[in-house]
Image: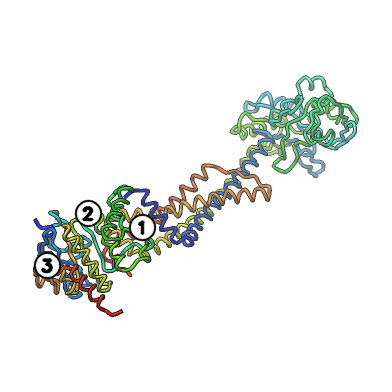
Amino acid sequence: MIPLETLRVALRALLRNKMRSFLTMLGIIIGVGAVIAMVAIGEGAKARVEESFASMGSNLLIVMPGSTNAGGARGGFGSMPTLTWDDLRAIRGEISTVRYAAAQLRTNAQLQSEDQNWSTTVTGTSPEYFLIRSWRAASGRSLLDSDIDASAKVVVLGQTVVDKLFGASADPVGQTIRIKNIPFEVVGVLAKKGQSPMGQDYDDGVFVPQTTFASKIQGGLQKFLQGTIFVGATSTDATARAEEQISSLLRDRHRIGTGQDDDFSVRNLTEMANAQQEGMKTLTTLLASIAAVSLLVGGIGIMNIMLVSVTERTREIGVRMAVGATPLNILTQFLVEALTLSVLGGLIGIALGVLAANQLAQKFGWPMLIRPDIVVVSVAFSGFVGVVFGLYPAQKASRLDPIDALRYE
Amino acid sequence: MALIDLDSVSKVYRMGDVEVYALREVSFSVEARDFVAVMGSSGSGKSTLMNVIGCLDRPTGGSYHLDGREVSRLDRRELAHVRNRTLGFVFQSFNLLSRTSALENVELPLIYGGTPGRDRHRRAARALERVGLAQRMDHHPNQMSGGQQQRVAIARALVAEPHLIVADEPTGNLDSRTSLEIMALFQELGAAGITVLLVTHEPDIAAYASRVVTMRDGRIRSDVRQTPRRVADDLAALDRGQEEVPA
């Protein structure tokens, strides 16, 4: 028997009971639709998390100064400057897993342009900082080593600050702004970076050379570094090792004996990012297994209807056998019917899933990402469900005795 | 060589501990081009004989040669092929596929025989023309009378050009005039060289066959050759009778 003919017979049989076929498919439609929608939203959220961690900096570690311990009252990390400029140089020079290290000195200050003012974070740092965080200048330039050496009064602006001081479409490069009433020349604007994983606006801030920061904006102690050190490890895998090496280097340099608390802390942000991604993965797996269960239920629905169909059409099966259908012909016919139900259900499910994901994404402003491999797997899996749950009814049909089948009322 | 050759064929059904003999060592042969009627009351074994001859059922003992081939030990798949190629069935209850056009019903054996589409349509249409239903190819069974449905069934039995047509009480559900028309068709097929084996319990119908086999208790009781009545004559007589009825 010709395969195309089998498909035609199957389609006709299904069209004969449109409502029933549709209701049977509904299980698969909902199952596949749920998989597609959930995975699309899950993947979208994952991509957003990845993106925000990427804009935070790649292979990033942050070294924070230690705490005060005055008369038993212990301050938090950063309450006392314990890190020195020499520590920074040592981290940069002595540890093999560290590619970049830069100071981040921060304060809040009032900024003024010709006709506007804005309060934001002023960061004093060096060119490596931008490399660690993978931040590029969208116009003009970033900070240069020569700016550091000369304590130049130059500033690089974040996009939000540009919006507030100059208006959204302005290019302020070459203009002058005042920070704490000291004039700075704007040399560059950073590309828009969005929000941190915690919702902080990366674009709301300005950057000046660390030397200028120390001399003009916030006078500090010469030896101590009044801020944190940002470290870029050589690779993602190296971050854990870098964390250990920095810890042991600083303990050594600060002469901290065994059993004593560190006077600094090292945060490994790559690991935080990984942990968050693991969480997303768990969520996606959970959603996928719920969807798999609904596909299973859909499959049982198909089996149920196919069994009913075999019983109803016993006589037809008898007639077909009498005129020469082999058991394999009958088996194929019912299997193709089950497969048609499940695959058609799968395809409709994909369409609805994409539609639902789109709607949800638009309504709630969620990101979404349709992965082609998930689409293919869904169709394949619904086909698999069709075969698994269609096999028993089809086998039952093919094993009917033609005489009994012809006599069946 | 005989078209049908049964040698000591038995069929035993086991009902729990009891063995029920449907056929007891039946030996029976039919030459090609013969028109045989099998008679007998219900339970006489005539249906079982039909099923065995029609390759729907396998005997439990003895041997059966159909067209020179031993078919009593074939498996289900091989039996299906034999049914498809050498046999045509006509049933009392027509057994057409509902909601399927006459043409498609007739095409069914060709589909399983692997005949490609265009050839299939052509042959099915020709078979329908042969039974006088050229105008009703697109009709569905529920749009046709019993006689027309049985004609479709006969066309279906003919379409694969088998040597043998096996008919199980083909007139059982039809009124007497339609019965005659169907029997006329069978006589035409017989004249065209097709072997017809017909099961009936009506002596009137058996009278149109050239050989009548009577069964009882799973055995052949009598096997008589006769000069068949011509259906065409009886139809003509019937028409005359109707003309005589005053309007």
Quadrant where the C terminus of chain A sits is: bottom left
* Distance CA(mark 1)–CA(mark 3): 43 Å
Foreground of the two, A374 or A350: A350
Three-letter code for the amino acid on which mark 2 is drawn? Glu
Q: The numbered mark 2 sits on a residue in which chain?
A: B
| In the image: residue A5, left or right of residue A142 | left
Does label 3 lie on the same chain as label 1? Answer: no
Q: Which mark is residue B211?
A: 3
Place residue A264 in its image quadrant.
top right
Place residue B148 in its image quadrant.
bottom left
Q: Which mark is residue A6?
A: none
Q: Position of residue B129 (x, y in %)?
A: 28, 57
Three-letter code for the amino acid on which mark 1 is drawn? Ala
Above or below B134: residue B183: below
At label 3, counting other C-alpha atoms closer than 10 Å, the crowd grade (few under 14, some 14-19, many 20 or more) is many
For label 1, the residue is A394
